[in-house]
């Protein structure tokens, strides 16, 4: 049995994309172990765990998310701990998730294993300063050159890959597992239910939605998930009679959350190119659950929803624009029925079950 070691720089609780890849590979007969950095020590009682035949090994160099350079020393400790853990182990593949994961993997790989760089996003836009972007670009190019295969999720990533690395590319977009959503049946409600489902990072965009709908008693705002903005939003929840912020959920609960959703709110800060060019997994979850979507204006998502007529676009920083759109939808709910009919036409066009087979090009 060939052995795969994966590296992620989160606590894996679980990381849905990483979990889906690992699960597919275990079902194909591979021995998969995921090395995780639980930087906030949330799972110290679960240092070793097995989930659906996937082995989990956690490391605990303490650091807080969002503290920037303060995380460098704990990150180096994580590298050293992974290297020490792997030094006497045999494995055939080292599958590294994201840029920080490939940095760890580069220092931990054995001579004979294949190094896989799984790029979950377009990293070059993460640096606000131009010099930082150049550094990130250099790092991405360097580790792509050192990798045996490169997994990418969108065309923007592919455009900047050097010609010598093109043949290494494997396409694996963030599509949902349709079997997790196949039984999603919408429940009835007199209220218009607008949900955000996912990592809660964007305080301003979500607060703008809450403020825009504050006086609408027949509209309910539901925010599901945890993240850096969760505590700040939870602290002001009581100021709103029609807002519920529920916190962390397990991915197996996702279909139930969508069953109680009339509109998915999928807005992000558009000052980042990353958010303007990305297709988040929740976008495709909305499609597979036939949930009309509100997205940012000026993004690839706006182009998509206009082409298929499955949602609405709005400036997430414009309180009045959000309020006017929600009022319009609430007063003309028949519009949602047409959007749902259009969603039915493409409902199963973006499912994980087919695209995940691209991993077979790496793992033989």
Image (spheres, grey):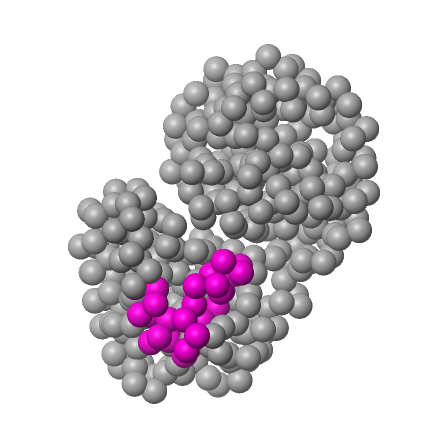
Residue 154 falls inside the magenta stretch = yes
**Side of 29 where 69 appears, left or right:** left
Relative to 327, is 295 above or below?
Answer: below
Q: Is residue 45 visible?
A: no
Start-end of magenta stretch? 139-164
Q: Residue furthest left?
A: 73
Where is residue 84 drawn, in percent x and y? Answer: 22, 72
Where is residue 114 drawn, in percent x and y? Answer: 39, 81
Q: Nearer the viewer, residue 324 or 40?
A: 324
Q: Is residue 235 visible?
A: yes
Quadrant position of residue 187: top right
Relative to 74, is 197 above or below?
Answer: above
**Side of 273 where 193 appears, left or right:** right
**Side of 328 where 161 appears, left or right:** left
Relative to 58, is 232 above or below?
Answer: above
Q: How many marks?
A: 0
> What residue appears at the point 30 percent right and 82 percent down from the top-left corner?
110
**Side of 18 where 39 appears, left or right:** left
Q: Nearer the viewer, residue 316 or 162?
A: 162
> What residue appears at the point 45 percent right and 71 percent down from the top-left corner?
150
Residue 201 falls inside the magenta stretch = no
> What residue appears at the point 71 percent right and 21 percent down from the top-left corner?
328
> What residue appears at the point 65 percent right and 23 percent down from the top-left corner?
326
Q: Nearer the viewer, residue 50 or 221?
A: 221
Where is residue 133 drawn, in percent x and y? Answer: 31, 53
Quadrant position of residue 160: bottom left
């Amino acid at each position: 049995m060939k052995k795969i070691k994966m590296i992620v720089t989160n606590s894996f609780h679980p990381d849905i994309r990483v979990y889906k890849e690992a699960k597919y590979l275990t079902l194909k007969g591979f021995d998969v172990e995921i090395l995780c950095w639980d930087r906030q020590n949330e799972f110290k009682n679960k240092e070793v765990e097995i989930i659906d035949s996937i082995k989990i090994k956690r490391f605990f160099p303490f650091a807080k998310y969002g503290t920037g350079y303060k995380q460098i020393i704990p990150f180096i400790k994580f590298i050293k701990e992974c290297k020490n853990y792997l030094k006497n182990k045999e494995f055939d593949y080292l599958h590294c998730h994201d840029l920080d994961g490939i940095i760890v993997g580069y220092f931990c790989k054995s001579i004979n294993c294949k190094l896989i760089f799984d790029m979950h996003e377009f990293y070059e836009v993460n640096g606000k300063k131009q010099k930082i972007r150049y550094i990130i670009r250099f790092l991405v190019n360097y580790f792509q050159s050192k990798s045996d295969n490169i997994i990418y999720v969108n065309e923007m990533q592919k455009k900047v890959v050097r010609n010598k690395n093109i043949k290494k590319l494997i396409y694996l977009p963030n599509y949902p597992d349709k079997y997790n959503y196949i039984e999603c049946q919408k429940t009835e409600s007199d209220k218009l239910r607008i949900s955000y489902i996912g990592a809660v990072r964007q305080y301003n965009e979500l607060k703008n939605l809450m403020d825009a709908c504050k006086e609408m008693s027949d509209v309910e705002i539901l925010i599901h998930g945890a993240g850096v903005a969760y505590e700040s939003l939870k602290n002001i929840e009581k100021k709103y009679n029609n807002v519920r912020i529920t916190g962390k959920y397990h991915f197996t609960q996702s279909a139930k959350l969508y069953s109680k959703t009339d509109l998915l709110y999928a807005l992000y800060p558009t000052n980042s190119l990353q958010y303007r060019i990305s297709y988040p997994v929740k976008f495709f979850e909305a499609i597979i659950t036939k949930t009309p979507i509100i997205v940012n204006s000026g993004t690839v998502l706006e182009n998509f929803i206009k082409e298929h007529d499955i949602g609405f676009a709005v400036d997430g920083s414009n309180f009045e624009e959000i309020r006017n759109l929600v009022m319009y939808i609430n007063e003309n709910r028949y519009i949602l029925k047409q959007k749902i009919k259009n969603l039915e036409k493409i409902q199963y066009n973006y499912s994980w079950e087919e695209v995940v087979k691209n991993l077979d090009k790496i793992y033989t």
